[in-house]
Image: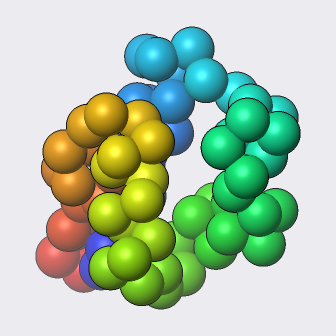
Amino acid sequence: MITFDPFWKTLKEKHITQYDLITKYNVSRSMLDKLRHNKSITLVTLNDLCIMLDCNVSDIIEFKKE
């Protein structure tokens, strides 16, 4: 299972709030909802998040065997 737990940790470490993502980075509320519920996102979105947060893919997603 793919989880976005590292994404939330990265946000916290970088002192970026969900409000910041919406207002400064133009991330939609529906995208945040997808991330919150571990729903699928596109590779383009993953790439955009890495650029926004200046981080690696592993700072956003994690694979866990079920």
The quarter holding residue 43 reads: bottom left
Which residue is at a point 73% across and 52% down the rendered structure image?
Answer: 26
Left or right side of 34 for 60: left
- Residue 52 is situated, as x and y percent measured from the top left of the image, at 45, 42
In the depicted view, which residue is nearer to us: 29 or 23? 23
* Quadrant placement of the N terminus: bottom left
Q: Is residue 33 visible?
A: no
Within the image, what quadrant is residue 37 found in?
bottom right
Against 22, residue 41 (above or below) is below
Residue 64 in sight:
yes
Asked if 35 appears above or below 10 in the picture, the reply is below
Residue found at x 57% / y 14%: 15
Identity of the residue drawn at 26% across and 37% down: 55
| Nearest to the observer: residue 53 or residue 6 | 53
Taking depth in this image into account, of 42 and 9 the one nearest to the observer is 42
- x, y percent for residue 11: 51, 30
In the figure, 34 relative to 56: above or below?
below
Image quadrant in which the C terminus is located: bottom left
Percent of width and height locating residue 19: 82, 35
Horizontal side of residue 59 vs 52, given as left or right = left
Q: In the drawing, does residue 12 fall left or right of residue 49?
A: right
